[in-house]
Amino acid sequence: MTAYRLTSGGLVDRGANLDFKFDGKTLTGLSGDTLASALLANDRLLVGRSFKYHRPRGIVTAGASEPNALVTIGKGASTDPNTKATVAELYAGLDARSQNRWPSLKYDFGAVNGLLSPFLGAGFYYKTFMWPAAFWEKVYEPIIRRAAGLGRVVLERDPEAYEKCWAHCDLLVVGSGPTGLMAALVAGRAGLRVILADEDFRLGGSLLAETTRIDGVSAQAFAEASLAELRSLPNVTIMPRTTVFGWYDDNVFGAVERVQKHVAMPQAKLPVERLWRIAAKRALLATGAEERPLVFGGNDKPGVMMAGAMRTYANRFGVAAGRSVAIFSNGSAGYQAAHDLAAQGVEIAAIIDSRSDVADVAPAGVRLIQSGSVIDTQGRQRVSGIVVERSGFEETIACDAIGMSGGWNPVIHLACQRGAKAVWSPELQTFLAPDVGNGLVVAGSAAGRYTLVGCLADGAQKAAAIAADLGFSAPAEAMPVVEEDIDPSFTALWYSPGAKAKAFIDFQNDVHVRDIGLALREGFGHVEHAKRYTTNGMATDQGKLSGINATGLLAAMQGISPADVGTTTFRPFYTPVTLGALAGTSRDEHAAPVRKSPLHGWAQKNGAVFVDSGLWYRPAYFARSGEKTWRESTDREVRNVRENVGLCDVSTLGKIEIFGPDAAEFLNRIYCNAFLKLPVGKARYGLMLREDGMVYDDGTTSRLSSEHFFMTTTTALAGGVMSHMEYCAQVLWPDLRVRFCSSTDQWAQMAIAGPKARLVVQALVEDDISDAAFPFLAAGIVALKGGLKARLFRISFSGELAYELAVPAGSGEAVADAIMEEGRAHGICAYGLEALNVLRMEKGHVTHAEFDGRVTPDDAGFGRMVSAQKPDFIGKRLSTRYGLTAADRMQMVGLKPVEADQHIRAGAHLLREGAKPSTLNDQGYVSSACFSPTLGHDIALAFLKSGRERYGERIVVWDKLAGADVVAEVCNPVFVDPGNAKLNV
Amino acid sequence: MRYSAFSIVKNALSGNVNWKPAWRQPEPKPFYDVIIVGGGGHGLATAYYLAREFGLKNIAVLEKNYLGSGNVGRNTTIVRSNYMLPGNEPFYEFSMKLWEGMEQDLNYNAMLSQRGVINLYHNDGQRDAYIRRGNAMWMEGVPAELLDRAALKKMLPFLNFAHARFPIMGGLLQKRGGTARHDAVAWGYARAADRLGVDLIQNCEVTGIRREHGVVTGVETSKGFIGCGKLGLAAAGNTSRVGEMAGLKLPIESHVLQAFVTEGLKPAIDHVITYGAGHFYISQSDKGGLVFGAEIDGYNSYAQRGNLATVEHVMEEGVTMIPGLSRVRVLRSWGGVMDMSMDGSPIISQTPIDNLYLNCGWCYGGFKATPASGWCFAHLIAKNETHPVARFLRLDRFERGYPIDEHGAGPQPNLH
Amino acid sequence: MASLIHCPHCGVRPKEEFSIRGDASLVRPDPEASDEAWHDYVHIRSNPRGRYREHWQHVAGCRRWLVVERDTFTHEVFSVTDGAATAREAGR
């Protein structure tokens, strides 16, 4: 028996027992415990296995830097791997399991790696596993992969909810220890909007483990009183369980609040975690300092712990880390731990101090060994003794726990996330935050002011300065009186010499002193090289404990200053954050908004099967009873449009209203074809280029009056075209008198296509729409029977006699219903995207399958449309580049299989008959293909080198992916009605 | 020192104290036949192939920081040759073949892991584009497979098949694609180049390019002037700044791309998977961390750090593609500065200055290109003629109208 | 940059509301300008490390194109102005 619950003391509720499980065994802790303190109280020293050598490991810290005590909490889809026991708040029913061991924590087969450690040093992967050549991937790597990793992830859908919020404040205080509390009090009293965030579930930071008294009360009572005052201030927001993980541009901080990670059954109405983006005018970093481990032989056994953590467990949680504790220290903090433990009745086996002639006083009766060096520890799965060397004499001292204190590292992570390098302080023997401007100020222990008095004063002063800077007046206040304060000074010790066992630097990744030596020897002495070569600092704690010691060792081994070695780069996240918190509600079906056409209801009634189209859901086809496949429905719809009439929802096309005296001029500049002289009442197909001469988008634009045009764009680029036009109007030609707005959502638009289209449309429209009165490409405002004003366009994507009718969105479904009703006698059917696509392919019309951003107008057969007369339009000049006019460019052609029952798939490539497949021989590709119900065989649109000269040529349609070659004939891409007879009736 | 089973055992038994430095730390000589600016993957590979393939002797690589301190050490380690356009595919396949022989070639294990790269598709248009791409790969002799939804479900059951906003219809698989240990690639080339006599000079920042009578005669550096016969720039991320020293105007913008790694996990994701309804991609390293990223932040930047809005967006895509990632914790994010070119494809090219050569514009695809980039750049520098697989990657392709635009997005770098 | 953009029309708004196009210092050449001038306009970028003017559009707000002047290394934003006003000043 080593660790145990003290009979009294601590901020735990001794009346509130909480049962929890560890590796299947039920244990009991107290309310106020972390999982780690509860495990210690139950004498569970062995809690994990290390990454590489699978060495037995115990709890080292009492906080966020814990490298060893990582457990998996929860079950099924609610499993959280790699959870730090030292920060996991205990709750009744918590179910934790140890990790990276097989078959059990106690008997781990992976520990055999430790025997092989001479072969597994830093960088060993790179030198080995190369023989024989094929063995790396087949044999070695799978073994390494299985052995690696920590916890096991359950890749199932997370049942719990997450959310995101913005918060704004004058001052964000990170950390609620003495510095943060004082800063929040000063700023809060001055009237600043303050957010005080702390990762812990209990606020107070180091005060929670202090034994001194402040203003005549215990440190804990002082913290509680301060918090009570802060809670009473309406301008102060206190955020416990909230980790500020990142500092981003414009002083925006990322923080994650663990709303319900500490409960067995999260409430459905609340998120389990909440992401905060905190826009702070100023921030004050009061994150304290991390105690530095000592690097000595055998320093990784369960029972070896930071001395400060032992203090925290004793004073805050009422748990003794051992019955007989040895302290190894290079500064006064170790003595402080010894005093506090001794006061709780724990035996102090000895204090080993690496320094000589120290003023620090050991507790009465405790043996003090100065100038001592720890060279080894005894015990296997828990410490049983410590081997000390002094003046050449070795001695073994029995103990069941070892507290180590190697000095202090200010927690400056956030301050260094934006590129500024930490600065070495020779006086403090540590790295401090650089000056990062007035957006972020570091205070208290985080700024190297370790005394309690210093922390309180620094927090108050810096907060007052910030308040003044922001125009608030902070009254001068008397500082709290601290009864007994210590100066935790130390003398840096990078390595305790004479180690007889591995002396670890990075506990989780099993990096020990020799690895650093090896890295240096092999030329990897740069601190980043050493990190990457040895993996030091790459574990889940990101070097919180190991980074400084690696720097110190690299410096010591080369005889240079740590200043010349520097630190590795600090980057987000301060501590790891779940993807769930960062993703928030944007997941699954809610990953993107859904857009529904005003005719969605109409389509549903008519049996539509919907398909995604960008954010839209569009009808793919309208299945009728008896139809078993999409093809059956589509073929019927196509035939019906060609023979009778069909109605298709085209509301998703982008629609833009364009107004102004210069509207025509504007259109003339953004389209490559002419628009200046488009008559009122006419629609025109328009082709829009990018400035590099490639086709960007196409659509029709109609002139409704001399200064009002109505443009349609493709569905896919509706937003892009709008932005492009805004850019042209605002930035390129700000003096043109043109204004426009999107009306995509305002109009329900439907295509009525087929030889009987006029019969159907005329039945609804008051105006005369005979061919004479409303010919092909006519456009105008018409009155529907009953008086509704609508826009009618005689345009055709299908190649049939066709109209597009636009009505206000709210009337869309009623009008569509009326059309179906009127059309019933004429055999009308609803048709979807699939049929639309077949119809347009039969007619040789293009979509973004053809206009893929690499195609010129001429490639697609629109060369003659490009105006040579216009002095300027977007894309004009670069269209004439050599490569865009070269004779061997791929041009759009039609393809039909030579044997009519053979199939062609979009994405197939083209080869000359008899040619060997090769990139050099590649002649082009199929952009669109379908079965044509009208022709009774497959047809395709394709891009073929110099294609328009090659009509009649037989070509191999090569679809290796499908294992199919089809011989096809190259032909004109207009398969149906090339003379446009059907349009002009 | 050659690495062999024998040397491993011998050193292990002698306490590993006899390993020799992987490379020398030479002081710069006054003159080199070829100087390569940039000690990243591409620069080191170029130097190695110059020495090994083209027999050059007097070569230096100048690195302003430490070897491998640029993008070779901050990418998501993906290796693949699944391109669509004839300007790209032969080049990347050449690279893939070099990857496959790299361990033996360099006597260094860069841990190439051909786990398979799968690009998901979510609609018919994307499927057709992947068929086109897969067939383009086959044209170059590169095996590709189209997987349907059922096959994917079996292979990757953890994908979001039940609740996807954009349903997963299938994927394009290149089995030979995978990952490699990024740092080891730089170290392997560095060590091999050093063994062939190349001087690798770290902490040597180029501050100026000296020209006389229209040709480059050497570079001003933080270690003084160093003369050279030919100068190759392989400083992606900072190409514009180095190019400016020689008066080059370039079709390049610098953008920041973020990448992420999670805490270590037991093997869960075997392949490299890319999301078709966004830019997200993910793989799992041999150490167990899930390595992933998505799109660039979108604005010009030389800062090696990104923004929270992009971080969130990446996570949204990740959780949408693989719902079970929700409870995994992301450990670290970092940013690399990318040379974004005007068509999303790289440049390995002569320049208007006769003895100045340019290797840049890698966008976010530079890592997989490392061996071929080095080989082709070395070929160009040594012979003053383009390697056949890199013949389309010329600098003047924009003026001449031969962009290699895989995304069809046009000359706006942040869209590629 | 940038987490927050101070839109001259809408106030301080998060980056997510904006889209970014690129270099705002480019001036579209005259139709008669040389091939080189056009090539430079479409393809060549100064790409400085430091002060830079960039076109952003407030797509989820006023939909105005803005000129954001900022530092490409520190990400500090110096000014945000309306693109049309800037273009007029430049006499385009």
Image (cartoon, grey):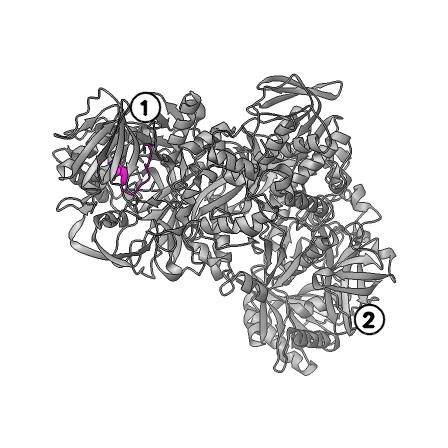
Residue that badge 2 annotates: A899
Q: CA distance from mark 2 to mark 1?
A: 86 Å
x, y percent for residue B267: 48, 53
Residue that badge 1 annotates: A428
Q: In what quadrant of the picture does the C terminus of chain A appear? A: bottom right
Taking depth in this image into account, of A958 and A377 the one nearest to the observer is A377
Residue bounds of the magenta highlight: A294-309
**Residue lying at 71% horizontally and 37% vertically, measured from the top left:** B376
The chain identifier of the residue carrying mark 1 reads A
Three-letter amino acid code of the residue under disc 1? Leu
Taking depth in this image into account, of A824 and B208 the one nearest to the observer is B208
Taking depth in this image into account, of A860 and A498 the one nearest to the observer is A498
User: Marks 2 and 1: same chain?
Assistant: yes
Q: Quadrant of residue C39?
A: top right
Determine if the magenta segment contains residue A306: yes
Q: Tell me if residue A867 comes above or below residue A356 in the rendering.
A: below
x, y percent for residue A783: 64, 69
Determine if the magenta segment contains residue B146: no
Q: Secondary structure at mark 2?
A: loop
Residue A793 seen: yes
Task: Name which of mark 2 and mark 1 comes first in the sequence.
Answer: 1
The chain identifier of the residue carrying mark 2 reads A
Using residue B259 as the reference point, say whether residue B234 is left or right of it.
Answer: right
x, y percent for residue A57: 33, 44
Q: Main secondary structure of the magenta part?
A: loop
CB atoms at circles 2 and 1 under 8 Å apart? no
